[in-house]
Image: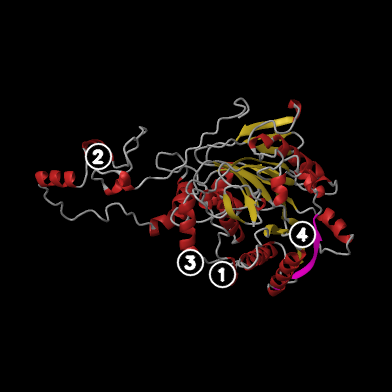
Amino acid sequence: MLQIKNFKNVNLAGQPEQSGLYDPIYEHGACGVGFVANINGTPTHTIVSNAIQVSINLEHRGAIGSDKLTGDGGGLLLQIPDDFLRQVCSEQNLELPSPGKYGVGMFFMPHEEAKIEKCKQTVQEIVEAENCKLLGWRNVPCNGDSLGEISRLTQPTVHQIFVTSDNHEGEDLERKLYVVRRCIEKNISSWTKEDFSQFYVCSFSHKTIVYKGLLTGSQLPVFFPDLKDPRFTSAFAITHQRYSTNTFPAWNLAQPFRCLAHNGEINTLRGNINQMKAREKNLESELLGDDIEKIKPVIQNEYGSDSAVFDNVFELLVKSGRSLSHSAMMMVPEACGKKYYMSEDKRAFYESHASFMEPWDGPAAIVITDGRFIGALLDRNGLRPARYTVTKNGMIIMASETGVLDIPGEEVRQRGRLQPGKMFLVDLEQNRIVPDNEIKAKISRQAPYRRYLKENLIELRGLFNPSRVPDVDLEVLRKQQHAFGYTDEDINITISHMVSRGQEPIGAMGNDNALAVLSNKPQLLFHYFKQLFAQVTNPPIDPLRE
């Protein structure tokens, strides 16, 4: 156990247990996020170096510890650099299959050799049990000289694993690696006799790889020399700088995660988690088949960050056969009430999916990828900044602010901002940017959602109207209201508003009354309950660019 002032029982990953007013259930963060991509899909080292520069230029949106060297977290999500890995693996007599026929896992592990060997042995047993073949391991070079004291204290070792399968390739291999990863995570997380909290799988895919840690943008290429190697190429790179507003920074909570990077807060998180847990037993998938039982629980750690939980659910939707854009529309819908103008097909899509997936609501700018598409979406209120620039040579830069790369004006073809509830994708196979209208028109017409609603939707309105309105003795009613603590304000302002307008009353005045539980006066039952909500004020550092 580590020792951190004012906290007990801190695990080796640097995360304390619940203590006093601290509860990990309330962990959120706000950050800087972005991506760089070649629209033509050509992998280059320039994309990697540009993404590192974006991360450095977003450092002011992240945070550092009191030692001035420990970042809250930073990293890159990239395409697997096949040529680079093929060459470095050949140096240790490890031959890789052709691209698309092998997967790469990025693992954090403890420092003790005995623990590392125990983890590796367990990983190998699970890989083989899932009818895959472990090709070998690679110790990822790491230079911790630039780390701060706090990040060095919890620094894990970093390892890469190479896996193939005679029975799977392409998307089938991707799903199998997902299942293998979940089996590994569940197995090792159940070990309680020793502290294996540093074990974490950053990524396990045949298309993408994640380099991340408790780092600042400038520390990324120093800590991971791989990223500076000119042989390391990618057609895109997602970058992230974390600002953990009320959380404990940790290596495993650094972003990007396996499918996305997120700036914002999911205010509906607890409800989303509870609903996801409630429907887990009913989950089915033609593509995953019986393997779907192996990935449960879907949410790896419900006390992790909101971004990590969001990534768990988003990844399930993508791996079970939904497209990247379909999954994003399900989880982060745009405003679609009756007063908003939109096509009937799109409205039917949102209403149909609302019956089995609640919106993951809150201020959010999210960058997403599945290896072929990369894109971004904004919450329906537009409460996080997202700017993009397209150059004449076919590079696109999207970030929490403009100007994260020095692009001469004459090389810029287009500048813009992501609007509330909108998204865009870059198709790296068709070499084009896919706009919001095209994405959502295609997705909303893939199935007859209007017919689904017409045949299956049951409106609750009118089902529970009383057959007879009871007679009311106003004198008796008044006495009962007094007895149960109703005030003139409750009756004339709150209840009358609800009756006349059919909606909850909303006010902005402060309330200096004693809490109901501490008051010696009669109280309504409702006064013992308060609604929890998050109000985030994020003034721009540079209002002109934001």
Residue shown at 36% from the left, 33% from the top:
510
- Looking at the image, tell me whether mark 4 or mark 2 is earlier in sequence order: 4
The N terminus - image quarter: bottom right
Provide the residue designation for mark 3.
282
Quarter where residue 60 is shown: top right
Label 4: state its secondary structure: strand
| Mark 4 residue crowding within 10 angstroms, few (<14) / some (14–19) / many (20+) | some
What is the chief secondary structure element of the magenta stretch? strand
Which of label 2 and label 3 is nearer to you? 2
> Between 58 and 522, which is closer to the camera in this rendering?
522
In the visual, does 542 lie left or right of 279? Answer: right
Q: Amino acid at mark 1?
A: Glu
The residues tagged by marks 1 and 2 sit, at their Cα atoms, a distance apart of 50 Å
The answer to which image quadrant residue 206 occupies is bottom right
Q: Residue at x 30, y 47 (%)?
A: 526
Q: Which residue is mark 1?
A: 293
The residue pinned by badge 4 equals 160
On screen, residue 474 versus residue 434, left or right, reads left
Q: CA distance from mark 3 to mark 4?
A: 35 Å
Circles 4, 2 touching at the beta carbon (< 8 Å): no
Residue 495 appearing in the image: yes
Q: Position of residue 78 (x, y in %)?
A: 73, 49
Foreground label between 3 and 4: 4
The amino acid marked with disc number 2 is Asp
Note whether 271 is above or below 196 in the view shown: above
State which region is magenta: 131-140
Residue annotated with mark 2: 490
